[in-house]
Amino acid sequence: METQTKDNVSTIKINENFNFSCQAEFRQTYEKIPKSNRFILDFSKTSYIDSAALGMLLLLKEYAGGDGSKIEIIKCKPEVQNIFQISNFGQLFKIS
Amino acid sequence: MCQPLIHETLLVKDFMGDDASLKLDKAIVSLNLDRKDSFNIHLVVNELVSNALDHGLLLLSSAEKSQPSGFDAYYRMRSERIKQGNTGHIEIHISREFSAERHKLHIHVADTGDGFDTDSLDAKLPGSDCTFGRGISIVRQLCSSVSYSPKGNQVHVTYDLEG
């Protein structure tokens, strides 16, 4: 996954199909980024997610310091945003 | 009135490469749903099929996925077990019910495994920060009904179409 870091803000461009088959790739991507950075997850390309993707996002949150983490999910398609919403992810991540 | 639309049989070996997911994608595209329904049905069918494969046939436990290393171990074990020549299979039936108010899709997924104790499901619904066990809770949110056969190896869900 493509990443870009500037002034301690790292943007990860999430795959088109963000499901269990990306779990290793996603983890290897965020583990290269310092935990204390602000993470921006760009979902503009993503047209499909599954339940494992939600688990993967929670593992990133844990990596980035749990409640003190700074993670923002941006540019979701409405269908994807709906899944975050019904899973109460609005309480755990900043979604815009 | 109920119209049968899809009947697919997936063998464990179809999950070695992309065969299983390509077959399902093609079947769902053939339903000609609008974008949101198509996305939701894709998700629901994939979650039900993953549960049938992972837990019904391959006997994997999702609790492994509570930590990063567990996620890796889980999917490594999954691909190893897929290659072990398991003779089980999964049947997927989708039909459309026409009604005056809202059209519905009925999705039935059955596996040849031993099933599970369906009473244990309610107690296990995950909290919002739990890294596993989310598949069935998403299915419950998206569908108007979800029911298991007594043995637990068959699940029937009803999805109310928006489009």
Image: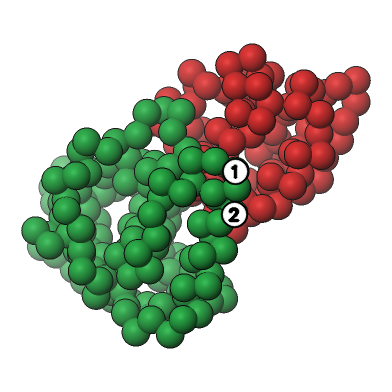
Q: For label 2, count other residues whose C-alpha is less than 10 Å away and answer few (under 14), some (14-19) or many (20+).
A: some
Chain of the residue displaying label 1: B
Rendered colour, chain B: green
Query: In the depicted view, which residue is nearer to us: B58 or B143?
Result: B58
Q: For label 1, count other residues whose C-alpha is less than 10 Å away and answer few (under 14), some (14-19) or many (20+).
A: many
Query: In the depicted view, which residue is nearer to us: B43 or A28?
Result: A28
In this rendering, the answer to whether A4 lies above or below B22 is above
The part of the image, by quadrant, that contains residue A41 is top right
Q: Amino acid at mark 1?
A: Pro
Left or right: where A83 falls relative to B151 = right
- The residue under label 2 is B72
Q: Amino acid at mark 2?
A: Asp
Chain of the residue displaying label 2: B
Which chain wears red?
A: A
Picture coordinates of residue B62, whole percent (x, y): 41, 50
Q: Would you say the residues marked 2 and 1 are in contact, meaning their CB atoms lie under 8 Å apart?
A: yes
- Residue lying at 81% horizontally and 39% vertically, measured from the top left: A32
In this rendering, the answer to whether B25 lies above or below A36 is below
Picture coordinates of residue A96, whole percent (x, y): 61, 22
